[in-house]
Amino acid sequence: MNGIDEIDILNEVARGVAVDEDGSVYVADSSNNRIVKWMVNATKGVVVAGGTGIGNRTDQFNIPGDMIRDKSGTLYVVDIRNHRIVCVPAGARNSITIAGGYGQGNASSQLDTPIYLAFDNEGSLYVSDENNYRIQKFSKTGTPPSTGGYVHTPSKLALAFGFLLLIVSSV
């Protein structure tokens, strides 16, 4: 196999990557609907979330994508075809939905094919909501993640990002 084929295969399989302070790499193995952790010098990865088939239960994904790992070890994952953002606390195999998860749609509480996520310094979550052509902002409510913890809050900044996304995607 040449390098181009390997890259093409990687692009079809891994849609998100995060790295922890020890250098372990977390890969969104999208084709197998799981998150795999590869420790430094490991010859095998360890499934840390999902991996129980395609679905929308707390132990399943339907194409995991972009992800972020925070300092406490929590993984925040875009679950693309479940139209939700989930968090997986360190040591847990089950996820908690923190944004979306109310079916595919365009209501303020819904997502339609989320792709990327980011956090700002205040802990607000930004999600690129591809098929709605917008960036959704979800502010932290102060409640524990087990109860959701985020609520949609429209902002001028989110609208500006949405407009920028439209311009970039049309180029």
Image (cartoon, grey):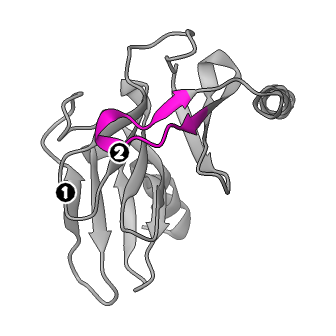
Are the residues flagged by discs 2 and 1 in contact, CB closer than 8 Å?
Answer: no
Front of the two marks 2 and 1: 2
Label 2: which residue? 144
Name the residue type under label 1: Ala
For label 1, the SS is loop
Residue identified by numbered label 1: 92
Specify the quadrant of the image occupied by residue 131.
top right
Element marked by disc 2: loop
Q: Residue furthest front?
A: 142
> In the displayed structure, would residue 14 be above or below residue 45?
above
Q: Which residues are magenta?
A: 138-151
Left or right side of 165 for 16: left
Q: CA distance from mark 2 to mark 1?
A: 15 Å
Q: Residue at x 31, y 34 (%)?
A: 147
* Left or right of residue 59, residue 74 in this image: right
Residue 78 against residue 47 in the figure, above or below: above
